[in-house]
Image (cartoon, rainbow, N blue to C red):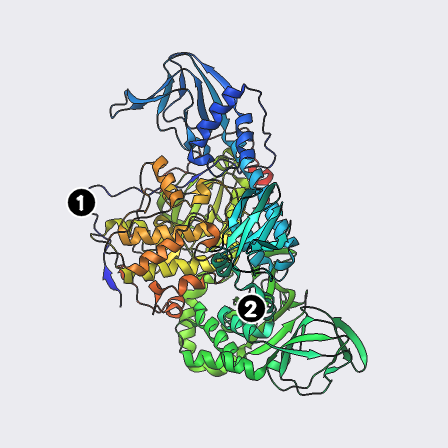
């Protein structure tokens, strides 16, 4: 069992303060006007030289840099005039000195300004942090001579970057979608490939690859041409849309080499190794994708599907030849490589299938009679998968599917402490049901008497016509119907064909009757995870204390129906003043979609005239940051595996729902009374279903390079932050800690230094998580989160035990009972809500006018 201890004693000296997240006031909009200001060529060059020296501009192409230079506006200041003031809040401009001189001043401990040695002269720039996020100016800059400056605004810079990024993305997507070689890739694979492809340019006569390097990279030609030669003889030429490097063309002697042969040649490039990691071998990807989408194979792992794709056997049929007849005993599944087949029932043709079509999948399950007759319409090549080959590769398909159902049952909190044997028996007895698109799986108002697991497809949870949650393979619902008689509170409707496993109350009663008392106890604990969000008002809550104050509100400790909760209180005036209404609604929508024991779940959300309230789970053990900083020595790697494992499961849950968390750090991890960690504070969480987000947000020490460079980001930023978190847990500090300007450069360089006592496998995991290229970051490759779970550092780690919350934690807070708040930092209940003193205008109906969608 995990050891028990009281609240950790603080180290000698001052305990470091919690680090605050940062954000830009508003998202980079597509509609910001980018000005074009005429200026002398000498001034343009001066601005260009200054920005090229700055990290924030180094990922921009020539056209974008020129747009920045053109957008700069002029400012004249007199000697002695303050340009920026230390502590100034409205900071969103970067300055380039055209002429004159400026000196930096900083307040000392007495508050008196002291001149520093830093002087800005013509061609130098200052104030770049204001281009990143909202933060007070760190120093004062004053002109010491009459000075002329050029100003670059944050909103303009972000608009330029966003437009350049979106144009580049559009060009890459178009090139990949138009290339016949990539037709076989799925939408997800194409998205990963597009993110990884890099632009390169060559001039006529440039040697692109010599005899030793040819074949190590793939080139997709956008403009111009690449020529492949062998022994001085041209054997192939690829123009726009051509893919080079996948194979060696026939003809000529010796090894091939590659050169540009037409004016300016522009290409997209990726290394072969990187391509394999992202999407796998091109020659059988389309076969893998067809197998992956079969509902009856949905329980197989990616590695098992890949093996099956490689082992498919080619068979050929001539025009008119019978493949199988209605009533035959089926044992094979087929994919069409080329050609056409007819599918007939009772002598009438029902459909024609062509290249990449598939049929006969139910023959893999059992020898049931074929319901159709299939015949070749022309010379046709098929890829065949027999039931025997399937069994040889992965074992019994029925057993694989049952094991998957059992593992899902193990992860349901209601069943978490039940014996594996009983859960396996339930999994075996559950009924499989197929629902067509638009059909209701359950209806609001009907008596709830069954539990469901989504095997394949997606379903929407509806309250009236409003979708409140999306269910994916592996999700479950209706489990509390097994414990009590009540009506369904929502409708669940199939989105496309959905395969579910259904278990009725009679089935569970028959198998679990001896464990009824255990189930009742689990149900009482599980109510916090139940998808029943009560209607609550402030009057229903007993307020106990204040747990903390943030930028936009405070958190109260409250009691409701005898249980303790955290109540997040936010001022509407502050929200409106910061223009964060959409931000708030997005946070609520994300929280309503989530329900997991590894995140702090939303219990209820409500509002009154002046405030918005989120009622959340309460984690009695305090925040993980305090525990880390209070330790006398670093956390062991064994303990770190447990804590990082909790975070991996939380992020896996969110990413499966296309949600990027975007502010992972120890301060946002809360410890339960049982020692497990929960992910908290969803203020920056966002659904990123396609494309990228351009909002600058997060905590500086945890920002990924793409956030620093403002090049657009996805869920990959969370895996970067996981690498930083692991480093901080093991080493006691973050990997790139320094002054902010130096820290951001270190983040983009991404070359962390490790203490000698960190194991080789931990270093390897951190390096792969801290990859500066998002598409090559562990967690974003073809294997997804499984690449992290299967990394050697986690060798032997019991992921199922962690998911079922059966592992003993490294540390268990010592609490006397439900009313023991000793691990929490308690503030007076009268602590004001930030923003309550703000009055924007005479509106008294903000609740109706601004928050009517809340």
Q: Compared with residue 122, is residue 289 higher up or lower down, i.e. above or below?
A: below
Front position in the image: 581 or 26: 26
Front position in the image: 498 or 261: 261
Mark sitting on residue 582? none
Residue 763's quadrant in the figure?
bottom left
Figure quadrant of the N terminus? bottom left
Front position in the image: 595 or 485: 595
Identified at 43% across, 62% down, the residue is 787
Of mark 2 and mark 1, the one earlier in the sequence is 1
Q: Residue furthest left?
A: 12
Residue assigned mark 2: 486
**CA gap, disc 2 and disc 1:** 56 Å
Relative to residue 262, is residue 807 drawn left or right?
left
Mark sitting on residue 12? 1
Q: Compared with residue 345, is residue 602 higher up or lower down, i.e. above or below?
A: above
Front position in the image: 181 or 327: 181
Q: Position of residue 720 (x, y in %)?
A: 41, 51
Identified at 52% across, 29% down, the residue is 840
Q: Compared with residue 523, is residue 637 higher up or lower down, i.e. above or below?
A: above
Q: Secondary structure at mark 1?
A: loop
Relative to residue 790, is residue 469 drawn left or right?
right
Q: Position of residue 559 (x, y in %)?
A: 39, 53
How many C-alpha atoms fall within 10 Å of the one at disc 2: few (<14), some, or many (≥20)?
some
Q: Secondary structure at mark 2?
A: loop
Relative to residue 742, is residue 636 drawn left or right?
left
How many C-alpha atoms fall within 10 Å of the one at disc 1: few (<14), some, or many (≥20)?
few
Q: Nearer the viewer, mark 2 or mark 1?
A: 1
Q: Position of residue 434 (x, y in %)?
A: 64, 73
Please say whether residue 374 is visible from this viewpoint: yes
Please say whether residue 428 is visible from this viewpoint: no
Q: Position of residue 467 (x, y in %)?
A: 61, 56
């Amino acid at each position: 069992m995990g050891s028990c201890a009281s609240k950790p004693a603080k180290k000698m000296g001052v305990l470091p303060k919690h680090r605050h997240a940062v954000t830009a006031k508003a998202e980079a909009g597509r509609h910001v006007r980018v000005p074009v200001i005429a200026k002398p060529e000498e001034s343009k060059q001066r601005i260009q030289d200054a920005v090229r020296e700055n990290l924030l501009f180094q990922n921009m192409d020539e056209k974008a840099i020129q747009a920045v230079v053109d957008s700069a506006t002029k400012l004249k200041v007199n000697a002695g005039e303050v340009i920026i003031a230390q502590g100034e809040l409205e900071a969103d401009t970067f300055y380039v000195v055209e002429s004159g001189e400026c000196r930096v001043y900083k307040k000392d401990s007495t508050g008196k300004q002291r001149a520093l040695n830093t002087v800005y002269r013509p061609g130098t720039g200052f104030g770049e942090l204001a281009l990143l996020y909202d933060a007070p100016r760190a120093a004062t800059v004053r002109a010491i001579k009459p000075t002329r400056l050029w100003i670059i605004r944050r909103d303009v810079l972000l608009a330029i970057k966003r437009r350049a990024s979106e144009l580049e993305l559009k060009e890459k997507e178009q090139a990949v979608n138009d290339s016949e070689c990539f037709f076989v890739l799925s939408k997800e694979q194409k998205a990963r490939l597009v993110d990884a492809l890099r632009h390169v340019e060559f001039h006529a006569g440039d040697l692109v690859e010599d005899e030793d390097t040819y074949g190590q990279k793939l080139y997709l030609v956008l403009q111009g041409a690449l020529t492949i030669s062998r022994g001085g003889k041209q054997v192939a030429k690829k123009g726009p849309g051509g893919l080079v490097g996948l194979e060696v063309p026939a003809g000529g002697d010796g090894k091939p080499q590659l050169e540009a042969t037409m004016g300016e040649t522009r290409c997209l490039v990726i290394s072969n190794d990187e391509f394999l990691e992202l999407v796998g071998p091109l020659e059988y990807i389309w076969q893998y994708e067809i197998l992956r989408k079969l509902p009856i194979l949905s329980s197989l792992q990616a590695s098992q599907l890949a093996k099956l794709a490689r082992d498919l056997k080619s068979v050929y049929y001539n025009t008119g030849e019978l493949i199988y007849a209605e009533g035959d005993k089926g044992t094979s599944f087929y994919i069409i490589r080329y050609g056409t087949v007819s599918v007939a029932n009772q002598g009438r043709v029902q459909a024609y299938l062509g290249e990449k079509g598939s049929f006969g999948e139910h023959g893999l399950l059992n020898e049931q009679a074929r319901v159709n007759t299939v015949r070749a319409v022309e010379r046709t090549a098929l890829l065949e998968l027999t039931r025997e080959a399937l069994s040889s590769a992965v074992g019994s398909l029925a057993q694989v599917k049952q094991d998957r159902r059992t593992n899902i049952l193990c992860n349901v909190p209601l069943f978490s402490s039940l014996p594996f044997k009983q859960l396996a028996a339930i999994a075996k007895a559950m009924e499989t049901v197929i629902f067509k698109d638009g059909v209701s799986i359950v209806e609001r108002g009907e008596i709830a008497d069954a539990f469901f697991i989504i095997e394949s497809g997606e379903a929407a949870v509806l309250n009236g016509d409003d979708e409140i949650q999306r269910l994916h393979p592996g999700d479950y619902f209706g489990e509390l119907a097994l414990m009590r008689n009540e009506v369904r509170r929502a409708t669940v409707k199939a989105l496309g064909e959905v395969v579910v496993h259904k278990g009725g109350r009679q089935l569970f009663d028959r198998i679990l009757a001896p464990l009824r008392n255990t189930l009742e106890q689990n149900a009482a604990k599980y109510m916090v995870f139940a998808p029943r969000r009560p209607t609550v008002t402030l009057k229903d809550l007993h307020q106990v204390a204040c747990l903390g104050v943030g930028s936009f509100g405070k958190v109260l400790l409250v009691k409701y129906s005898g249980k303790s909760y955290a109540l997040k209180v936010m001022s509407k005036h502050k929200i409106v003043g910061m223009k964060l209404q959409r931000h708030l609604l997005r946070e609520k929508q994300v929280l309503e979609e989530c329900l997991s024991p590894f995140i702090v779940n939303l219990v209820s959300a409500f509002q009154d005239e002046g405030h918005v309230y989120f009622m959340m789970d309460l984690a009695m053990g305090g925040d993980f940051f305090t525990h880390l900083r209070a330790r006398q020595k670093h956390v062991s790697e064994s303990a770190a595996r447990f804590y990082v494992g909790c975070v991996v499961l939380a992020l896996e849950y969110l990413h499966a729902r296309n949600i990027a968390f975007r502010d992972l750090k120890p301060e946002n991890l809360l410890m339960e009374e049982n020692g497990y960690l929960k992910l908290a504070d969803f203020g920056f969480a966002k659904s990123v279903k396609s494309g990228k987000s351009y909002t600058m947000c997060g905590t500086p020490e945890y920002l990924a390079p793409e956030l620093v460079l403002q090049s657009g980001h996805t869920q990959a930023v969370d895996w970067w932050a996981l690498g930083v978190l692991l480093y901080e847990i093991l080493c006691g500090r973050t990997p790139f800690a320094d002054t902010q300007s130096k820290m951001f450069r270190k983040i983009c360089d991404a070359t962390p230094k490790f203490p000698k006592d960190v194991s080789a496998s931990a270093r390897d995991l951190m390096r792969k998580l801290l990859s500066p290229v998002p598409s090559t970051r562990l967690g974003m490759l073809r294997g997804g989160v499984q690449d992290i779970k299967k990394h050697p550092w986690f060798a032997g780690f019991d992921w199922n035990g962690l998911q079922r919350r059966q592992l003993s934690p490294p540390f268990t807070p010592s609490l006397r009972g439900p009313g023991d708040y000793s691990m929490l930092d308690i503030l007076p209940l009268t602590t004001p809500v930030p923003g309550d003193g703000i009055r924007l205008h005479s509106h008294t109906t903000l609740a109706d006018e601004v928050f009517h969608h809340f």
